[in-house]
Amino acid sequence: MRGSLVFYHPTTLQEAIGLLGEHGEEAKVVAGSTALTILMRQRLIAPSVLVSIGAIPGLDGIEERDGAIRIGAMVRHRDVELSELVRARVPVLAETFGVVANVRVRNAATVGGVLAESDYASDPPAVFVALDAEIEVRGPGGERTIPARDFFVAFYETALEPNEIVTAIRIPIPVTGSGTAYHKFVSRSSEDRPCVGVAALVHLASDGTCADLRVAVGAAAETPQRFPNVEALAVGQTLTPELTGRIGDAYADAIDTLDDMRGSAWYRTEMVRVWVGRAIETATDAAADRSAPG
Amino acid sequence: MTATDPSSPRTSPRPVDGEGKISLTLRVNGSAERVRARPNHTLLEVLRNELHLTGPREGCGVGMCGACTVLVDGRPVSSCLLPAALAEDHELTTIEGLEGPNGELHPIQEAYVEHTGFQCSYCTPGFILATKALLEECPDVTRDEAKAYLAGNLCRCGSYVKILDSVMDARDRVRG
């Protein structure tokens, strides 16, 4: 019922975690509120307690540390998009955050929020999974780290315990000689959520063969989809159109695609086939540019 | 010491009055406004219903159309998605905040009038505020860049060509 809601503004993580423990299922963490407001308006959720984490210091930084870019949970999408550090070190991440929704949503929506919401049709999760990112969370028992591939469990469901809070994400900086890409395929308007989103990383060896391939497909199923056994087909090989086509086919076969207003399951399967190949090609070109002498 | 010590303001809920409302202080168009609102009221609801600032309008209610655009610390956001309780401690600007001390139009508004960058004008405050943020971020913006930046503002009359003409003229007026 409207009006039965109470707001808390804790200023430490300990306080926030304590409030979540105290109120249990009734409580939700609120950060940018772009998703939360809609979910509440549509009566899909009806929390009676909102715990704002916006006043907690230390959650809003972007820094390079130990070969990774670490982004705090309260960092806005737009700040990832415009960050010079992110653009220089993990450009695909800036590009991906830059294609989410529209500039107003990107000014409000946070990195912690897109993780904790686990909406299958968000753009960043596929990139996080492809880049082997790790999510830092804090709960009553202290901190732990969850690999991105284990974090997204199902529709709007994550590996977070009820009283755990996302505090940051660490994205390893791709090694020299790697190229990355995120292809967002939209079936309606330019600022829509993806029908299919494909993140790819290609690492080329000095002889031009593929040393490492990673492909994660978002928005096609409940969670980002990655198949190491298919990726392995590329290792030691030259990424010819024939080979990327086979990898696209294998992803299309492997993913149990879903139906929604952005595309039927059949259509999504065909789009996975096409866009996996294109993402690998773009990432390969980027890798070749980066490893070119001079 | 526990995390839920009731004496701590951070770990107690915001006080609610007999009508179930909380007290908020919003800094809107340069002045501090004290308002009472339900904890789940959005900034849009409070601006329109409590402060009678009707420039921001509700269009889609889900952050897609831009009719409710408000600048928060100079950055456009959808006020239909932002709980008013999270808008404290920020500088808020609505279209009403653009007029000069004697009611004169802002150069961006003049450009929109000059080029008739509107028909019904429901979307116009949102477009003008988005244009303001765009020109502050990117004073030499190109037409294509403006098109990309404004892609998330919808004009159902379809005045996009004239809106882009207005933005390009506004750029020249603001840049001088």
Image (cartoon, coloured by chain):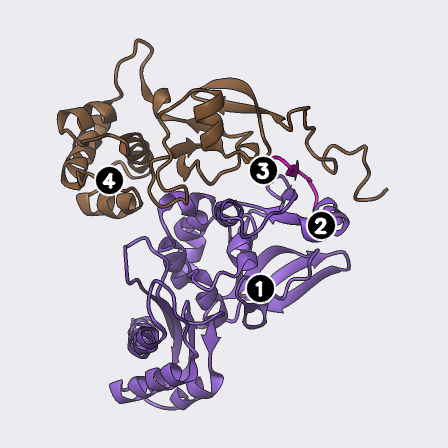
Chain colours: A purple, B brown
Q: Residue A203's mark?
A: none
Q: Residue A2's mark?
A: 3
Q: Quadrant of the N terminus of chain A?
A: top right
Q: CA distance from mark 4 to mark 1?
A: 36 Å
Quadrant for residue B97, please give it: top left
Q: Secondary structure at mark 4?
A: loop
**Residue for badge 2:** A20
Q: CA distance from mark 2 to mark 4?
A: 42 Å
| Amino acid type of the residue that numbered disc 4 sits on in the rendered structure | Cys
Q: Residues within 10 Å of mark 2 (few under 14, many from 20)?
A: many
Which of the two labelled residues, at mark 3 and mark 1, occupies the earlier sequence position? 3
Quadrant for residue B156, please give it: top left
| Amino acid type of the residue that numbered disc 2 sits on in the rendered structure | Leu
Q: Secondary structure at mark 2?
A: helix
Q: Which chain hosts label 1?
A: A
Boundaries of the magenta span: A1-14
Residue A3 lies in the magenta-colored region = yes
Q: Secondary structure at mark 1?
A: strand
**B14 relative to B52 in the view: left or right:** right
Residue at 83% across, 44% down: B2
Q: Residue A157's mark?
A: 1
Residue at 32% across, 36% down: B130
Q: Residues within 10 Å of mark 3 (few under 14, many from 20)?
A: few
Q: Are marks 2 and 3 in contact (CB under 8 Å)?
A: no
**Residue for badge 4:** B155
Q: Looking at the picture, how far across and down is residue B60, in whole percent? A: 36, 42
**A212 relative to A287 in the view: left or right:** right
Q: Looking at the picture, how far across and down is residue A165, in whole percent? A: 65, 54
